[in-house]
Amino acid sequence: EVQLLESGGGLVQPGGSLRLSCEASGFTFSSYAMSWVRQAPGKGLEWVSLISASDDSTFYADSVKGRFTISRDNSKNTLYLQLNSLRAEDTALYYCAKRSSGSGTYFDYWGQGTLVTVSS
Amino acid sequence: EVVVTQSPATLSVSPGERATLSCRASQSVSSNLAWYQQKPGQAPRLLISGASTRATGVPARFSGSGSGTEFTLTISSLQSEDLAVYCCQQYNKWPLTFGGGTKVEIK
């Protein structure tokens, strides 16, 4: 059974930093691209970032480019998102999602999310 | 970026009736569109990819259609457990973009 377990969220002041983690199990982690998708309170889903299976390609939404860094450790089956220079508008539930094995970049499994709140 | 717009924002349907949800892209995304179901307090669940291909385990009452800029998700006979927000996502161009969602209520 595929499982994605996010952690690392919390309350942080504007300008602060956090590191989110997503521990994966139930599939060959090193074979799949992984992504972070966020959902602000009462809002829709917003794609944040994606990293290729082998860690050689990364993609970011313009809203987080230069502030967030996605990475992975295939030996630990873990995905990361480093969040720097946080703003109030980064407040959201952050989901880890597995790219499907099908043609195209959509997501067949999602974690339950970790909440990031940016507030003074 | 490709803007994805969903309508209506809320849809109220009686059990057993058909629900029709719309998703429109600001430019052609070919058939590179997925639909997700998000029940209250839960993570999204993949329903449809390639505009019309049901994901594993998705009941046959869910169907997707369309290509280019206009897409439809149909629930042929609404069940009480279908109460959820339904969201579409285009994956034809970067950045990946999602629609704002349609909330399906049980009348």
Image: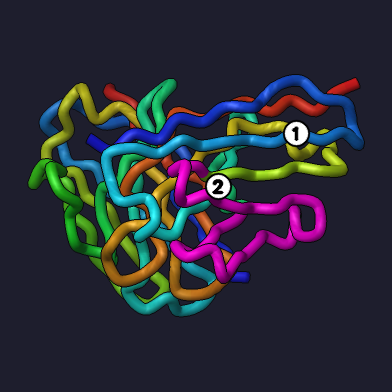
Q: Residue at x 80, y 52 (%)?
A: A67
User: Does residue A23 appear left or right of residue B86 in this picture?
Assistant: right
Which type of secondary structure does the marked residue at label 2 adopt?
strand
Whether residue A89 is visible, yes or no, is: yes
In the picture as drawn, the residue positioned furthest to the left comes out as B60
Q: Is residue A60 above or below residue B62?
A: below
- Residue wearing tag 1: A18
Question: What kind of residue is marked 1?
Answer: Leu
Chain containing mark 2: A
Question: What kind of residue is marked 2?
Answer: Trp
User: Does residue A49 appear left or right of residue A116 in this picture?
Assistant: left
The N terminus of chain A, quarter of image:
top left
- Residue wearing tag 2: A36
Mark 1 Cα-neighbour bin, 10 Å: few <14, some 14–19, many ≥20: some
Q: Is residue A38 above or below residue A51?
A: above
A59 magenta-colored: yes
Q: Residue at x 30, y 71 (%)?
A: A103
User: Does residue A3 appear left or right of residue B59 in this picture?
Assistant: right
**In the rendered image, residues at marks 1 and 2 fall on the same chain:** yes
Q: Earlier in the sequence, mark 1 or mark 2?
A: 1
Q: Residue at x 30, y 47 (%)?
A: B46
Q: Is residue A90 above or below residue B35?
A: above
**What is the x, y in percent for residue A81?**
64, 44
* Number of numbered discs overlaid on the protein picture: 2
**What is the x, y in percent for residue B71?**
33, 64
Closer to the camera, A91 or A71?
A71
Closer to the camera, B89 or B94?
B94
In magenta, the rendered stretch is A49-78
**What is the x, y in percent for residue A120?**
91, 21
Q: CA distance from mark 1 to mark 2?
A: 14 Å
A66 magenta-colored: yes
